[in-house]
Amino acid sequence: MSTYHIKHLEEYFHVYRKSVRDAETFWAEIAEEHFLWRKKWQQVLSWDFTKPEVKWFEGAQLNITENCIDRHLTSRPHKTAILFEPNDPKDDAQHITYKQLYERVNKFANVLKERGIKKGDRVCIYLPMIPELAVSVLACARIGAIHSVVFAGFSATALATRINDSSCKMVITSDGSYRGAKTIDLKGIVDEALNECKSVESVLVAQRIHSDITMKDGRDTWLQPLLDAASTICEPEVMDAEDPLFILYTSGSTGQPKGMVHTTAGYMVYAAYTFKNVFQYQEDDVYWCTADIGWITGHSYIVYGPLANGATTVMFEGVPSYPDFGRFWQLVAKHKVNQFYTAPTAIRALAKQGLEVVEPYDLSSLKVLGTVGEPINEEAWHWYNDNIGKKKSPIVDTWWQTETGGIMISPIPFSTPTKPTYATLPMPGIQPALMNENGQEIKGNQVEGRLCIKFPWPSMARTIWGNHQRYKDTYFSAFENKYFTGDGALRDEVGYYRITGRVDDVIIVSGHNLGTAPIEDAINEHPAVAESAIVGFPHDIKGNALYGYVTFKDTGESRDHTNVRTEINQLITERIGPIAKLDKIQFTKGLPKTRSGKIMRRILRKIAHKDTSNLGDTSTLLNPEVVQSIIDNAL
Ligand code: WTA
């Protein structure tokens, strides 16, 4: 029985039991049989959640790019590794073979070295979804530089915060990007950000939109001539298992984003293993994940997981609505996509367009459909199942996080019977626990609680860059000896998990995690604003939208609410990015507060949900009278 590739339900249960009974043997076998090591480990696992400290495959040496690229050069050199589909449907797709990817990554790696980048240096990558993005990620990994990809929809301020947090030495960007019919001036955003960043010595610029940009002397260089001159051979840096591979930022409960640090060996093993099983990838399949490489989904399931399995992975530069809402389905038909992985928000937006944009396309190549990023509602699940999968392709509702590095709870297609809105069963090696508010584990089925994980898995983030204490406080302090996910979940009568949503102050809007604190900080910068509080409310397409309650400074002036609303959203766009704009802004005289001065978000959330019949206990409020006036003026 193969441990690496699960093919039916009994096998899943068998493998799962083994992974719990003897986690070390389980992971050691997978690591040994399916990856290329320069040196074997001395110890499979050591861990202590109280510190917290977790190490996998200690003593082992490897380079992840040898696993993702070099080892395929003999078995599948001319197979397409990356299938790039440009924004404009009139432009040709590019098939980058494993051999070509090898050459491109090595050239890029040599350019990085020539520019003084060494093992352990941080390199910020701020690029659109073009091949250079995947290539630069892999080039960093080739030489042991730590990549920090920042989603190219973040603003200059957000970019600067991330560059400074990990003192990046270099930024890799492009002259601009295409987004449907629009272009975005990425280089301009980088220039603005770098006014605030002292650590950056050089900027490499890929040419994409041929716009007229300014290049700063001594700092900025066009990428292509350097690549043209570089050698196609670059010996991979030999990395220790626990050497950092990348940093990826995620929102938290303060304005400062958390730089999650992922290390090399465990991340590789887990991303590859879950890719194989969750998507049931077969050698000639074409796999497409629509995420951006700026998010963890793109890291693990566009780049590392698929390439470690020698897969063909599609990289799409554009948006689902350009040139029309049939684009995804047109591309599935064009490239005969076998596995398609997207977000509930995209499914909802596409479902709204009606079947006219689906029906023209032959979707018969599809075998597995995936979703990720937020709970999928029942209606969207059925639409996806009926109209895209034609009831033949199982839907894998994959629950996981930036912090977990890989998929944690998901059906295994053709093995686990699916159930709408349920992520179903834990992956082998994953030991979930539901906890009550008193910190006790809730055993048995048909229960609901806070979702924790009680045993380490190979791809868990090891720390927050530069702030281990925050890592401990955020994830390992709420429940003793357990990793706390920040999500709520329920377990049904057969033990299937359903994720019910965040239980902290992160709100997921269109699949993007947004912390309330950084948005409130941006609003509070408005000169007229005294205080603000953000909550989520249900939205047809975005899943959640943002509702802001804002109080004015008491200056006696009258204010034009429409203008202030626009200005607030401008501030948010500048500080964070357009994804964090508010749908509703209510101006109010006060915010409900406890006697210790904490804003009672629970009440504001209920008002935003138009659910004011039972506001719970308001007796502890300092100012109960504001509640009625907020309800009376609710939007
Ligand atoms: C949410 C994305 C329900 C959850 C990979 C989690 C989900 C957060 C699902 C992490 C799902 C992700 N069902 N909720 N299938 N997948 N989430 O870090 O709240 O961008 O904690 O990682 O998204 O978002 P992140």
Image: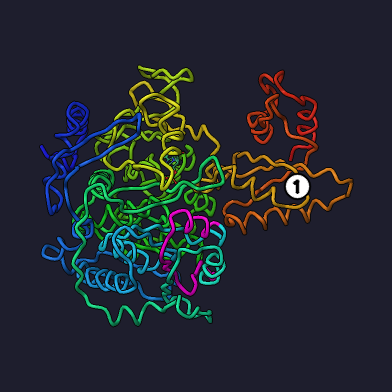
Is 1 rendered above or below residue 619? below
Q: Quadrant of residue 27?
A: top left
Is residue 174 on the magenta stretch?
yes
Left or right: 471, with 26 as reference point: right
Asked if one can make out residue 385 in the rendered structure from this viewpoint, the answer is no
Q: Quadrant of residue 200?
A: bottom left
Residue at 48% across, 51% down: 346
Q: Position of residue 268 (x, y in %)?
A: 25, 49
Residue at 23% across, 34% down: 46
Residue ID for mark 1: 529
Which residue range is magenta in the image? 158-185
Which image quadrant shows ligand 1?
Answer: top left
Residue count near mark 1 (Cα–Cα under 10 Å), binned few <14, some 14–19, many ≥20? some
Residue at 34% across, 45% down: 405
Q: Amino acid at mark 1?
A: Val
Q: Position of residue 535 (x, y in %)?
A: 62, 38
Please state, as top left, top right, bottom left or bottom right, where the C terminus lies in the image.
top right
SS assignment at label 1: strand
Q: Position of residue 310 (x, y in %)?
A: 20, 58
Please name whichever residue, 550 or 161, is drawn nearer the observer in this view of the structure: 161
Please name whichever residue, 456 or 120, is drawn nearer the observer in this view of the structure: 120
Is residue 181 on the magenta stretch?
yes
